[in-house]
């Protein structure tokens, strides 16, 4: 059923992914609420969210090149050790009452830089640990680890903020990042079988980009990924919905994120337990289209329980889309290019800071529901364009 778990090293990586995701979700709940408590505007909140992914634009490609050149584990260790230090320092500033918004932006920027180096190495490591046969199962299990982390982390952060304070929450976040570092150190890795040629970093990156350009299906999917990241930054808008529309406070905000996590868990469990997944192209296309429609529906809801239900289905569709995208990339790329192509995939996250800023500006001018509704409509249009321009994608896995 969960065939990837028969690989001992993958089990340690799975645990690392769980700790990383739990800590990242707790961090965002704490940081977003801190911004609002300090009097930050929706635009400042958008800027903080943008800083979490902005470094992907500058370092995502470099992170992929390094993953191919120096091995997968080292960039992940450095990135996660950085997160431990950043969280504990921010927590201390909060506890002593000297934290300011400018530091929050710096801290989230450092976290985004760590993410840019962590993710290409982590994604490409999956194939190294389980091989092609267990790849889809491993990617699905990754999503289970991520959603388990979000389901546990977001409500825990909300509870810690409500019953303790934000500083305590951030100390806990740093400790969980440290547990992730410790689990990664348990991997027993053989010397890498694939060695990148001794060329310049730029030429290494260009080689990966030329491969992506030669694959219309991959290029089309990455284009829709960019559109999604630019226009569907709903995680950044959730604190505004929680405070202004649903009026549910930080505990309710944690429950909103947990509802999405529960849906993603359900989708990942379904795919991980399936011996063979057919019509992967249809799942990918339908998932993108459904996500756009559901976000549009969420923007119209002012009832907490309906919003929770919508986010459960959003989570289910989102995890199906992400598993299909990552499986397509990892299974279509030669070994020697895998880290770099996953670096390009991380580069697409550069749309998130742009989206966060535009969503924050729109929310400040017209309200969070308007900003999210526009995003949902754009994603539906992008999914339709992918359907008509990439007919071979519909045949994937049929």
Image (cartoon, rainbow, N blue to C red):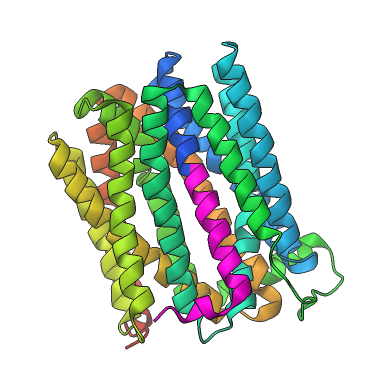
| Residue furthest top as drawn | 97
| Residue 310: % across, % down | 19, 49
Question: In the rendered image of this protein, does residue 149 appear above or below residue 51?
Answer: below
Camera sees residue 84: yes
Q: Is residue 317 left or right of residue 112?
A: left
Which residue occupies the foreground of this view, 44 or 178? 178
Q: Residue at x 45, y 69 (%)?
A: 141
Majority secondary structure of magenta residues: helix
Q: Is residue 377 left or right of residue 190?
A: left
Q: Is residue 346 left or right of residue 239?
A: right
Which residue occupies the foreground of this view, 121 or 149? 149
Q: Residue at x 36, y 24 (%)?
A: 162
| Residue 333: % across, % down | 59, 78
Verify whether residue 300 appears in magenta.
no
Q: Magenta segment, which residues?
A: 1-24
Question: In the rendered image of this protein, does residue 217 appear above or below residue 118?
Answer: below
Q: Which image quarter holds the C terminus? A: bottom left
| Residue 373: % across, % down | 23, 41
Question: In the rendered image of this protein, does residue 15 appear above or below residue 132?
Answer: above
């Amino acid at each position: 059923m969960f065939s990837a778990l028969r690989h001992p090293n993958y089990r340690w990586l799975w645990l690392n992914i769980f700790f990383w995701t739990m800590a990242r979700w707790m961090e965002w709940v704490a940081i977003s609420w801190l911004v609002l408590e300090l009097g930050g505007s929706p635009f400042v909140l958008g800027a903080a969210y943008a800083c979490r992914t902005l470094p992907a634009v500058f370092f995502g490609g470099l992170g992929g090149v390094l993953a191919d050149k120096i091995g997968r584990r080292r960039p992940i260790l450095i990135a996660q050790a950085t997160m431990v230090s950043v969280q504990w320092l921010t927590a201390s500033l909060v506890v002593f009452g000297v934290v300011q918004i400018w530091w929050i932006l710096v801290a989230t920027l450092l976290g985004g830089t760590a993410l840019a180096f962590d993710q290409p190495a982590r994604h490409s490591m999956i194939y190294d640990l389980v091989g092609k046969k267990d790849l889809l199962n491993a990617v699905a299990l990754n999503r289970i680890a991520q959603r388990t982390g979000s389901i546990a982390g977001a409500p825990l952060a909300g509870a810690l903020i409500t019953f303790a304070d934000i500083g305590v929450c951030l100390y806990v976040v740093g400790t969980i990042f440290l547990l992730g570092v410790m689990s990664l150190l348990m991997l027993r890795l053989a010397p890498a079988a694939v060695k990148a040629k001794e060329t310049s970093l730029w030429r290494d990156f260009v080689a990966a980009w030329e491969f992506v350009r030669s694959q219309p299906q991959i290029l089309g999917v990455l284009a829709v990924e960019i559109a999604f990241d630019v226009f569907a930054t709903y995680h950044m808008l959730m604190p505004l919905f929680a405070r202004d529309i649903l009026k549910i406070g930080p505990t309710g905000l944690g429950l909103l994120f947990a509802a999405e996590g529960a849906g993603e868990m359900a989708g990942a469990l379904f795919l991980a337990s399936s011996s063979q997944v057919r019509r992967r192209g249809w799942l990918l296309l339908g998932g993108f289209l459904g996500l756009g429609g559901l976000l549009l529906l969420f923007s119209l809801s002012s009832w907490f329980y309906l919003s929770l239900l919508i986010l459960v289905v959003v989570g289910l569709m989102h995890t199906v889309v992400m598993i299909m995208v990552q499986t397509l990339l990892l299974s279509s790329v030669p070994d020697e290019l895998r880290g770099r192509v996953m670096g390009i995939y991380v580069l697409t996250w550069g749309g998130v800071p742009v989206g966060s800023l535009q969503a924050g500006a729109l929310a400040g001018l017209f309200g969070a529901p308007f900003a999210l509704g526009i995003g949902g409509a754009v994603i539906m249009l992008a999914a339709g364009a992918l359907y008509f321009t990439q007919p071979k994608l519909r045949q994937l896995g049929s």
